[in-house]
Every structure is written in C-alpha cells, then in structure tokens.
C-alpha cells in the first residue's frame, strides 16, 4: 500500500519539484548512487572489482522527451565505456552497462532510441563488454523486447530484464531461455495495475521462483537480480546442476553489501548495479518504495535539516 502510494507520488510533478530540488536529498541519494560524475562511477567500479565484484553501470535518466538530452545520454555512455576500458575494467565483461530505452529517446521515436542503443552497443563491443536493457513500466515491455531482438542480431550478448511481477513474464522467460540469452530476472519496481501484474508480495515471490525455474532449466545465462534471502537460496539450489559460470547474482549498489561480498567470497559471480549521474529522482523513489524503512531514513534526513 505504502509502496503504491510512493510510486504514485513519484509521478507527481509537485512532489518531484520538492524532493529533487532539496539539497538535503543528496545525502540520502548517496546511499544508493555512486556519485554524479563518470569519475565517481569508474572509482566505484574499481573499488568493487578489488573485492571480486563485477558491475553494471547505469547513467541515470529516464523518460526523456528531448532528442538533445537523449544524445547527451549516449555521449555519457560512450565516455563511460571509454574510461572503463582505459582503466582495464571491461575485460571479460567485468564492467558492463545498463541502459533504459526511455533515456535514449524511445518516448520520442522508437527508431531514434534503437539507433542510440545500437551506438552504445557498438562502443560496448569495442570495449569488450556488453549492454543490458533495463525494463521500465509495462507499457514499454513489448517495445523493449522488440528492440532487444533487433540488437541481438548484431550484438548477441545484449541482455534483457524481465520482471517477475508481470503476468506475462513466465512466457517471456520461455522465449528468452535459449543459448546465449542473458536475462536479468527481478521482481519489478513500477506501479502496475492488477490486470497486468501480481499485486501481493507472496504472489510475486512465487512468480519469481517459477520464472527462475524456467531460466535455470534453459541454456541461457540467468542473472538473479534480487536481495531476497529466500530467493537467493532457491537460486543456489536451482543452479546446482548448472556448469560453473553459467549464471550470476546481481544486487543494487548500497543494498546488502555484506551479502554481495559473502556470495563473491563463496566463489559466485556477483554483479553490482551501479547508478551514477544527477538524474536520480526516479531511481531514488523506486528505492524508497521498495522498503518503508528507507522512507523513515529519508524523513529523518528531512527533519534534521529543517
Ligand atoms: C541488478 C538489479 C537490476 C534491476 N533492474 C530493474 C529493472 O530493470 N526494472 C525493474 O522494474 N526493476 C529492476 N530492479 C529492481 C527490482 O525489480 C526490485 O524492485 C528490487 O530488487 C527489490 O526486490 P528484491 O528482489 O530485492 O526483494 P524485496 O522483497 O523487495 O527485498 C528483499 C530484501 O532486500 C533488501 N532490500 C530490497 N530493496 C531494498 C531497498 N530499496 N533498500 C534497502 N534494502 C532493500 C531488504 O533487506 C529486503 O528485505 C533491479 C534490481 C536489481 C538487483
């Protein structure tokens, strides 16, 4: 209920103006975002690499209606990939990038977004790494999977995200469980109606396990994106028969870092999703919605500065 309220409020321009405009928000943001500059992102990737953790880096931003902004986002990714490669962090896919199609122009023109995504994929290939397409709200799912299909013709390593809370996802997992297919399975972070998405936490968890079962039984490369201890344990059990290195765990920067390290120390591949940039509003609101305790943290920060 609180989750739905926060996600609904996050779409309200007045709430955005208050939260994004308040300097005090930055302190809270720092818990979830590596910093604003490309140097911050590379430094974070390097620090995590020193602890045996891989990264997928996201240049923050979404829902742009400005072609110039979409172009700036592409340039930011090219610079990022260049810096990661120069720092020796991309070899073997140790650092890859995550891209939201709405950040590169899909709400303006899908062809423009596809061209922009292609440009980023080319740079990723030149840097010996890959791109994963983030998944946004359900109105974008078909277009994102279509773009994935197009991109995989030339860049077969391009990854997708599937959201277990969507009723359609088990079927999408079946479609994407083939050889060479990289699929990041997450619960889903947007406000979705009951017609398309399971609403209860238990229902979503059960859907996640069904989807994971499909992916783990397939020939692709499942990426288990969850901080949920039960799901992580189930993933371990389902992966028992798979060859080493044929799946990985993924978690968000700043969330359960000790668990990230524990899995990596146990020999698992663990990738941390590292966002950077100044367009952090939508990302922060989704993190607040996931955990009411974060909202308390945020409100205390507000109160202590007022
Ligand atoms: C690598 C990665 C990429 C993702 N990409 C996408 C995407 O493209 N599209 C999309 O819709 N969603 C994405 N998500 C978000 C995802 O859908 C969930 O909203 C998020 O991961 C929380 O779900 P959970 O599986 O961790 O389970 P939950 O049941 O939400 O959390 C389990 C436990 O994890 C910890 N935890 C979880 N979230 C938080 C938080 N915000 N702050 C503090 N502790 C927390 C708590 O201890 C909690 O008890 C991504 C998640 C990851 C890890």
Image: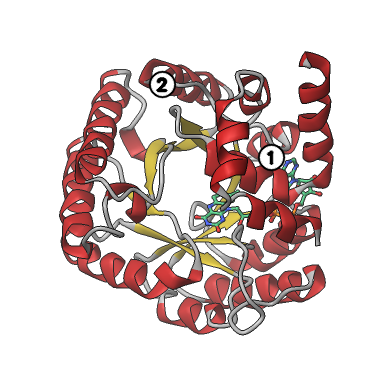
User: Could you say which is closer to the camera, residue 38 or residue 71?
Assistant: 71
- How crowded is the residue under tag 1: few (<14 C-alpha within 10 Å), some, or many (20+)? few
Image point 16% across, 63% down: which residue?
111
Can you tell which quarter of the image residue 272 is in? top right
Q: Nearer the viewer, mark 1 or mark 2?
A: 2
- How crowded is the residue under tag 2: few (<14 C-alpha within 10 Å), some, or many (20+)? many
Whether residue 100 is visible here, answered yes or no, is yes
Q: Percent from the top left, x then y, of residue 270?
A: 57, 42
Can you tell which quarter of the image residue 209 is in? bottom right
Q: Which residue is mark 2?
A: 42
User: Could you say which is closer to the camera, residue 62 or residue 170?
Assistant: 62
Q: Which labelled disc corresponds to residue 266? A: 1
Q: CA distance from mark 1 to mark 2?
A: 25 Å
Q: Dividing the image into 4 quarters, which one contains the N terminus?
A: bottom right
Image point 43% across, 54% down: which residue?
134
Q: Dividing the image into 4 quarters, which one contains the C terminus?
A: top right
Q: State left or right for residue 45 relative to residue 52.
A: left
């Amino acid at each position: 209920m609180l989750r739905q309220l926060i996600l609904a409020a996050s779409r309200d321009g007045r709430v955005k103006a208050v939260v994004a405009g308040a300097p005090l928000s930055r302190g809270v943001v720092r818990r979830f975002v590596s910093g604003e500059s490309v140097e911050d992102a590379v430094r974070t990737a390097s620090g995590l690499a020193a602890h045996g953790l891989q990264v997928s880096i996201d240049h923050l931003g979404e829902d742009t209606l400005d072609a110039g902004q979409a172009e700036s986002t592409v340039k930011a990714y090219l610079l990022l990939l260049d810096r990661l490669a120069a720092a020796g962090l991309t070899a073997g896919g140790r650092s890859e990038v995550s891209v939201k199609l709405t950040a590169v122009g899909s709400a303006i023109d899908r062809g423009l977004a596809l061209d922009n995504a292609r440009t980023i994929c080319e740079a990723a290939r030149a840097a010996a790494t890959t791109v994963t397409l983030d998944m946004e709200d359900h109105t974008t799912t078909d277009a994102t999977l279509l773009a994935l299909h197009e991109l995989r013709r030339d860049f077969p390593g391009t990854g997708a995200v599937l959201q277990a809370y969507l009723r359609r996802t088990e079927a999408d997992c079946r479609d994407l469980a083939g050889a060479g297919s990289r699929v990041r399975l997450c619960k889903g972070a947007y406000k979705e109606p009951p017609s398309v998405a399971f609403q209860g936490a238990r229902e979503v968890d059960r859907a996640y396990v069904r989807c994971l079962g499909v992916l783990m039984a397939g020939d692709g490369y499942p990426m288990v994106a969850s901080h949920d201890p039960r799901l992580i344990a189930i993933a371990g059990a389902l992966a028992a028969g798979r060859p080493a290195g044929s799946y990985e765990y993924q978690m968000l920067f700043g969330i359960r870092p000790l668990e990230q390290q524990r899995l990596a120390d146990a020999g698992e591949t663990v990738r941390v999703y590292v966002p950077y940039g100044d367009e952090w509003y939508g990302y922060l609101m989704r993190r607040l919605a996931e955990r009411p305790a974060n909202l308390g943290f945020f409100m205390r920060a507000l109160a202590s500065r007022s």
